[in-house]
Amino acid sequence: MNFLILEKTFFEGIKIFGICLFTLLFNRFLKLIVRKYLEEKVKISKEGQRKRIKTLLSAIEGSLKLIVWCLAILMILSEFGINIGPILASLGLTGFAIGMAARDILADFISGIFIILEDQYQVGDRIKIGNLEGNVVEFNLRRTIIKDEEGNLHLIPNSQIKIVSKKS
C-alpha cells in the first residue's frame, strides 16, 4: 500500500516536471517563430527596422509567455487533483471584474499598443519623457524602461507618457 502511494507521487512529479519542461521549450519555440515571422515581414535593411523588430519582440514575447505559463499552471493544478473546470468557467467573469478594477493596467496596455503602431520610439532610442531623459532599454505593452546618464533605470507606465521627445 505504501509503495503505491510512493509510485503515484513519483509519476505525478514526473508529469509536473514534464509540463514545466514542455512549457519552457514551447516558450523558446514561440520566440523563434515570432522572431522569424517578424524578420520576414519587416525586411531588415535599416537600423530603425531592427529596433522596431526588437521592440515588437519584447512586447509579443512577454504576452505569449504569460499566457503559456498560465495554461501550464492550470495543467499542474489538475495533476494535484484540483478540478480546474470551475476555475476555467469563472475565468471569464473574473477577467471582466479584474479588467474593471485594473483600468490603469488596461490603459497602460492600450497606450503601449499605440506606441508600437505609431512607431513613436523603440528599444535603443534616446528619448525624454517629462523631466527624465535616457535610452530605452526595454519596452513592453505595460511600461517603458529608460536608463539615464547616471545609470539609473526609470520604469514608466505607458499610460502616464503624455509627451515624448525623441533625440536623433
Image (cartoon, helix red, strand yellow):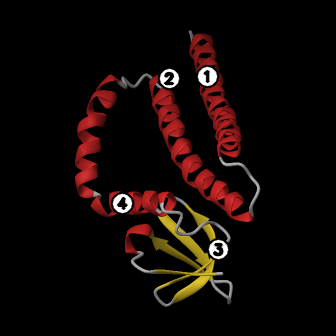
Q: Secondary structure at mark 3?
A: loop
Q: Which residue is mark 3?
A: 125
User: Where residue 110 sits: x, y (%)?
Assistant: 38, 58
Q: Which residue is mark 1?
A: 15
Q: Which residue is mark 2?
A: 79
In primary-sequence order, the first of circles 4 and 1 is 1
User: Where residue 129 sits: x, y (%)?
Assistant: 49, 82
Mark 1 or mark 3, which is nearer to you? Answer: 3
Q: Which mark is residue 105?
A: 4
Label 4 crowd (10 A; few <14 / some 14-19 / many >=20) = some
Dot 3 and dot 4 residues touching (CB under 8 Å): no
- x 71%, y 48%: residue: 43
In primary-sequence order, the first of circles 2 and 4 is 2
Q: Is 39 above or below relative to 155?
A: above
In primary-sequence order, the first of circles 1 and 3 is 1
Dot 1 and dot 3 residues touching (CB under 8 Å): no
In the displayed image of the protein, which residue is found farthest to the right? 45
Whole-Å distance between the Cαs marked 4 and 1?
Answer: 35 Å
User: Where residue 33 sits: x, y (%)?
Assistant: 67, 36
Q: Is 6 above or below relative to 106?
A: above
| Left or right relative to 73: residue 39 | right
Residue type beneath disc 3:
Asp
| Left or right relative to 106: residue 18 | right
Residue type beneath disc 4:
Ile
Along the viewing direction, whichever of 49 and 10 lies nearer the viewer = 49
In primary-sequence order, the first of circles 2 and 1 is 1
Mark 3 or mark 2, which is nearer to you? Answer: 3
In primary-sequence order, the first of circles 3 and 2 is 2
